[in-house]
Image (cartoon, helix red, strand yellow):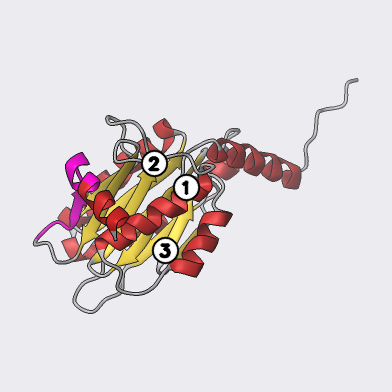
Amino acid sequence: MAMPFYVSPEQMMQDKAEYARKGIARGKSIVAIEYQDGIALVAENPSRSLSKLSEIYDKIAFAGVGKYSEFENLRKVGIRYADVKGYSYSRHDVTAKSLANAYSQAIGQVFTQEMKPLEIEILIVEAGDEGHPNEMYHLLYDGTITDYRRFVVMGGAKESAMQLLEESYRDNLTLTQAVDLCQKALLKTNGNKELTADTIEVAILNRKRGGRKFQRLQAAELQAILEEAGSA
């Protein structure tokens, strides 16, 4: 009689984690950073049609790295969740924290119950207003949540980028300074390959905007920012 194949739960979780990390490491990185008017998100993304940075709700944004189809599905689920909650209760009840908790449960369930884990990391950020601080929640492939202040890097080889930000970040950065610092951090993750307005994607949550705070910077706006940073 053949012995049944057995893998310990610990080994299975380790294998899943390693599989997910390898998939995510092949993706291009994203940096989110607090600046004087809110939060800026900068992603290395040569595609003009596929976005890694998106709006979820009035003052909440989503960013994803790893397998595009998987984090794109999560983005759509998050939008539906936020719309239903805001309609059923109040728009003020839709927060980055509640959304991150919902994502954590969904991602963690896939990690523990499915054979294949999600090859993604996602970031949920909310621009603070009326004296409230900004919020940034980073979620891993297993549903683990970490909240950050000032800045966060996800995807790829992020250690050197985090070190640069630790050394260079200061409070009350202008948008130009914030984007320039993010671009330098991304260069650390991609082997110092050139990054231009055509190969990065930038979005901001600007607390000073009326109504919805999310704004995606167009190529011309981004080019002007990069030129201003280069001449500073």
Q: Residues within 10 Å of mark 3 (few under 14, many from 20)?
A: some
Q: Amino acid at mark 1?
A: Leu
- Residue that sits furthest to the top in the current view: 1
* Distance in Å between CA atoms under marks 1 and 2: 7 Å
- Residue that sits furthest to the right in the current view: 1
Q: Which residues are magenta?
A: 211-223
Give the answer, above or below, for where 204 lies relative to 76: below
Label 2, secondary structure: give it.
Answer: loop
Asked if residue 126 shows in the view, the reply is no
Q: Quadrant of the C terminus?
A: bottom left
Label 1, secondary structure: give it.
Answer: helix
Q: Earlier in the sequence, mark 1 or mark 3?
A: 3
Q: Residue at x 73, y 45 (%)?
A: 9
* Distance in Å between CA atoms under marks 1 and 3: 16 Å
- Residue that sits furthest to the bottom in the current view: 131
Q: Residue at x 54, y 52 (%)?
A: 158
Dot 2 corresponds to which residue?
Answer: 195
Let me know if residue 87 is in the magenta part: no
Q: Amino acid at mark 3?
A: Phe
Q: Amino acid at mark 2?
A: Leu
Q: Earlier in the sequence, mark 1 or mark 2?
A: 1
Q: Residue at x 39, y 73 (%)?
A: 170
Dot 1 corresponds to which residue?
Answer: 187
Side (left or right) of 207 relative to 98: left
Q: Quadrant of the N terminus?
A: top right
